[in-house]
Image: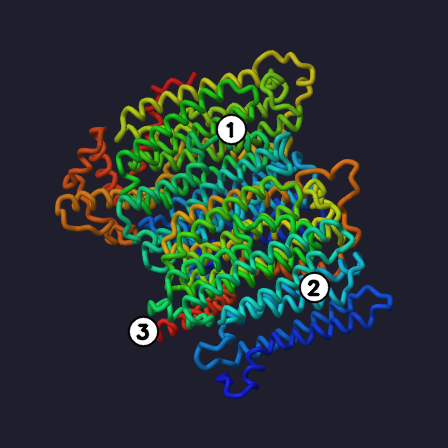
Amino acid sequence: MTDLLASILYEDWILHALIWLPLAGTVHVLLTSAERAKDVAFRWSALVFVLSLGLWWSYDPGDGGFAMVSSVPWIESWGVGYSLGIDGISVFMVLLTTFTSAIAILGSFEYVKTRRKAFYALMLLLEMGVVGFFLATDVFLFYVFFELTLVPMYFIVGIWGGQRRIYAAIKFFLYTAVGSLLMLVAILYVYFGSGAGSFGYDAFMDAGLNLREQLWLFAAFALAFGIKVPVFPLHTWLPDAHVEAPTPGSVILASVLLKMGTYGFLRFLLPFFPEASRHPVVVMVMLVLGVVGIIYAAWVAAVQPDAKKLVAYTSVAHMGFVVIGVFALTLNGLQGGMVVMISHGISTGALFLLLGMMYERRHSRLIEDFGGIGRVAPWFATAFVVTALASIGLPGTSGFVGEFLALLGAFETHMVVAAIAATGVVFAAYYMLPMVQRILFNELDRPENRTFADLSRREMAIMAPLVALMIWIGVSPTPFLERMEPSIEVVLERVEGARTGAAAEADAATNVAGPSPAFAPTAGRPPTDPSNSPARTTSSVGPPAPPLRAASSTLSSTLPSASDRRAMPATGHTRPREN
Amino acid sequence: MLLDYSSSFHYVMALLPELVLSVWGMVVLIAGVSRRQASGSGQELGWLALAGLALAAVANGWLHSGVSEAGADAMIAVDRFRLFANWVFILGAALSIVISLEYVARQRLQAGEYYSLILFAVVGMMFMGSARDLMMIFLGLELMSIGIYALAGFNRGDRRSAEAGLKYFLLGAFASAFLLFGIALVYGAAGSTNINAVSTAVQDGTAVAGLMIPGVALLAIGFAFKVSAVPFHMWTPDVYEGAPTPVTAFMAASVKTAAFVAFLRVFLVGLGGLYADWFNILWWIAAVTMVAGNVIALVQSSVKRMLAYSSIAHGGYLLVAIVAANDTATSGLLFYLLVYTIMTIGAFAVVLTVGNQGEANARIEDYGGFGWRKPVLGAMMTVLLLSLAGFPGTAGFIAKYHLLLGAAESRLWWLIVILVLTTVVSYWYYLRVAWYMWMKEAPEGADSADPAITPFAIRIVLVASVALIILAGIFPDAALDLAEGSAESLRRIATEAGAAAGP
């Protein structure tokens, strides 16, 4: 496979193709007739997905830096480049995007009956924006794509949404815009601070900011991404947008758009402002927000009569796990966060699709309107149960791997936080299982539910790959973990580099410069010996943390360190959510 | 060719675009008078006026390509800054005339006077952009303003148009008085009305501070009136709403451009030495203008009025460039004015079309469902609105970003924060039009807002402006280089003036 891809120079054109093919599809959809729009759109998105699959083989983790890099000057007088690259973090986000876009387009065949051309054109435009966001390695370009995704989503929610669609659309738009524009100010600050006259990723890494500046800039970036994620107090746009959005909009929103926030944490927030990111107060604030999000969202979800709103709140809870995993600042935590992102993208997207199918059949999303569906629609019920269990995080499903690793990572450094967050896993069962029971298994007491049709062949084709992925990641996460590990190491070393750099600074008390360029990820692994660093040993609460980190760093060069973790799901049966 | 003003021919050359337009304005006027009795729509006079603008463009291009001036003290500057401003004026006037063609015919306005007034106003604007003498600026301002007073009240049958003309005249006269008084005081302080001489006097310390500071304050107020900065903006919404829509477009775009280029030249070149004195007052005016313009625009129910307040807000963004007072900001201001001219006139072209080439359907409810009935027109309006909002992918974003770069270079972080937060506010009212167009149905019982026709001329303007907006939003390099070169030509003069002031 790799040879085949190499023979067609796959790496040279694939990233550009992934961005511009959806745009070509948009134009094609606009030029075609309304009847054919859905087929045309699906073919384009399927083409993009099939092409993107090659990344699975052709992306070589290597040292975790950007691969398939290409850069063309764009706005030369400002030092802006059209620069693309892919690494172990973005490769999964891109695959998730191309996959869910195709699935969502397929899933809207029955749901969207009006103004189809505009709808499918906007879906493809949205895909273009999101893929561009994940591939951009120029900060200006990244910002352009970040904003560009807002417009199609605004129209998708506002035109094809429910009763309060305009309110939800404008709320979504304005919330995100506040954050992103303040981030723009921060970007400008770094641009002038670095003095490099470039918006390139490396130039931003070497900006040489002091701690005080980093904290301010961190706040601006964290606000932008935190709204997008959404982190606890900033989440209020999400339930509105999810409930009002049409099914495909909800799918894209949950699967992909929320990931833009957490991806922003990993790609920009931590590497650009390493000293602020590892500042104990910042870490604690973010962890607490993550925990509060998990617990609060779980409680709120438990009392929702509207199934779609319930699932919307579970997104907030899941994203809380990502935040905890990321700000644990350990390899396990970050990898866990990544896996939760992927898993949530698949399972929550699938849940929204299933709820959309229910709505298409019964024109209701209220849990109480259903009951006993399992008897009349067994395939539907099977898919629903597997998806719900993956969302809860049952061992053997994708959700378990992610949440387990995220909690493990948090446990290494912040035991109390991890302990409280772990209760969120119990709550997940508490809100999800009653919904499953009331929809699928109670008495079949409503006559209109007796004619509830089972999955059609198209719907089967939608659900089968989703369910397969949930189980595949749950059973065998290693291919995923080993692809993302080097890039996550790079992020961690960037943060750790700041840590040891700051410690050395404190020791020598002479150096006033910011993080030295030697710790830039492209320069390879810095010679950090954990035992030399007083800051590290004093700040880590979980006793086994430093040895674990060190062990995994040294091991990873010889054998995939994920392999020793593969056994963990099997030994993790003590968790209370299996019944 | 080097202009050293050794012969009177050189004066003619330096003023070639202005002279061409002045003569052509009279030609249009006479042509209009001589066809008065004949029947016809008067559109041919519009095309005649456009031909005049084309000639002026040729003259401007000639100045642009091969002419330079000796020294930098002449009353009329032949620098890139002026020529860039001229391009913007010519473009704005041309677009305004094209969108007027159908309107003037349908409203039975006197075409000859209408088009010649536009040309004369452009001459005034060009003088404002080129003048290196405060008196010349005042003359240009008056020439422009008198034309615009008449144009604002041109739809005599409409009470609101008459009100707009009168209101604009009274408040414009006020502004002129402030400006003239300021000029008098600066003259008293510096002993000259030449901007370079004023600059020298300021830097030498020979200017009388007791006269200079009040003079600067009055100049600032006069210009603030003309750029409709808060709190001197009160006339703007009423005038913009009442004036004939094509005239409103012309005012919002070109009059503002003229006021800003004169504002910038006077304050950065002439009064640059007093930066510390006027920095605070302009900082506050910029901040208040951005906040008030955007916030009040939120509650407007008429699209025309909403665009009026939005133009006030854009004036606030542009003031940030003057406060920043560096090359990047100056180039940003020029680029912004170019983009702003295109997108504003484009948006008004849609307003005109929704209004059936008249003043109908001005309420935002009338836009309900408009996008689905006229998808191409709706899509173009959406692009223009996104550009006005400064959204990536459009030239409005590049322009706003350019302003931010300039402000960041001068470390005006709080002003930048105000700018971006008010931009978020502006998203709301621009998107509101979009949501009426695409997410609502047509108002019940109201006569449909569907335009009976979209005249060919309007289509040309819309396609051209949308294409330019997207093109400059994705490939801005050429326009940015032009703006940067123009901004640098201004600095060269500033530094020369500074060097002359040295010991």
Q: Is residue B86 above or below residue B394?
A: below
Q: Residue at x 50, y 35 (%)?
A: A254
Give the numbered dot on residue B345: none
Amino acid on which the number 1 mark rests in the picture: Ala
Residue found at x 25% / y 39%: A552
Quarter of the picture containing the C terminus of chain A is top left
Disc 1 marks which residue? Answer: A312
Output the chain of dot 1: A
Nearest the eye: A46 or B465: B465
Q: x, y percentage for residue A471?
A: 46, 31
| CA separation in Å, label 1 and label 3 | 69 Å
Task: Specify the amino acid type for callout 2.
Answer: Ile
Q: CA distance from mark 3 to mark 2?
A: 48 Å
Which of the two discs, 2 and 1, sits closer to the camera? 2
The subunit letter for the residue under badge 2 reads B
In the rendered image, residue A367, in percent from the top left (x then y), is placed at 58, 19
Q: Do the residues indicated by labels 3 and 2 lie within the same chain of the protein? A: yes
The residue tagged 2 is B97
**Chain label for disc 3:** B
* Residue B342 placement: quadrant: bottom right
Q: Nearer the viewer, mark 3 or mark 2?
A: 3
Please state the horizontal and vertical placement of residue A289, each as a whole percent of the image.
37, 29
Q: How is the image coloured?
A: rainbow
Determine the secondary structure under disc 3: loop
